[in-house]
Image (cartoon, grey):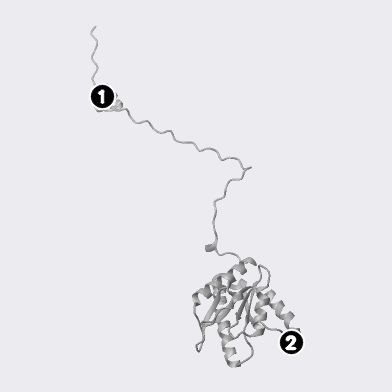
Amino acid sequence: MIALNIHIAYEWGGELAQNSLKYGFLRDLAKSVAQDCQRREGHQSLSIRLARLRGRHGAEVLPEIRRRIQSADVLLFDIADWNPNVLVELGIALAQPHGGPAVFIFLKEDQKIPSDLQGYLFTFYRETEDYQLVDSAGFRAALYSELLHRARAKGLPFLKADAVTEEKEPHEDSPPSAPQEQETPRRKPISSKSTGKSATSKKADHDSKPKRKKKS
């Protein structure tokens, strides 16, 4: 079984009902893509787990947050409320070495991107009653591709449709293949310029003529 972890970070404080709705929006987005990936690629061999990015009881908060970030395959950060905790967590995630978790950053449609994050591609959403992504197809395709890439890096086999077949070149030490015998082409009959008949037909006409008897 190949397991992938998706963690979601968003503001916990403020209006709980609104934050719960936002978490549900982000969770359902990731869950839909994850289920699509499982159904089309992994079947029973791929497990994708979703959870909030948070500490746990009985453990120091920051070390536990760092551990979960390092063990994640994909991280979703909603920084629309500029929550300090979420921004610290985002900084830790972006500071991970190459090959760390994939990071998706969410903002409201009318918000400006901070100057220090200008190089990142953001996912914008509209704050309606049920929230809507500005580019839903683009986000789904990007997340699907990231999940599939990381699953295959962990050993998920390629589907037959994805397999690339290549022609095998002969090995240097392998004996050369025996040359195939070529069929000798048949010669075309030589045409006779005078009669328009072939040489073969002329010989047949000559043989068909009655032979004269020799005088004694």
- Relative to 148, say whether 165 is above or below: above
Viewer-proximal residue, 119 or 176? 119
Q: Which residue is mark 1?
A: 205
Q: Which mark is residue 57?
A: 2
Q: At x 54% / y 56%, what residue is drawn?
A: 165
Viewer-proximal residue, 215 or 11? 11
Where's the C terminus, which quadrant? top left
Neighbours of disc 2 within 10 Å: few (<14), some (14-19), many (20+): few
Which numbered disc flags the more N-terminal residue, 2 or 1?
2
Figure quadrant of residue 175: top right
Q: At x 23% / y 25%, what residue is drawn?
A: 195
Where residue 183 sits in the image (x, y, percent)? Answer: 44, 35
Q: At x 49% / y 75%, what residue is drawn?
A: 137
Figure quadrant of residue 51: bottom right
Viewer-proximal residue, 113 or 132? 113
Q: Is residue 106 left or right of residue 192?
A: right
Residue furthest front as drawn? 115
Where residue 34 sits in the image (x, y, percent)? Answer: 57, 76
- Relative to 45, say whether 178 is above or below: above
What kind of element bears circle 2?
loop
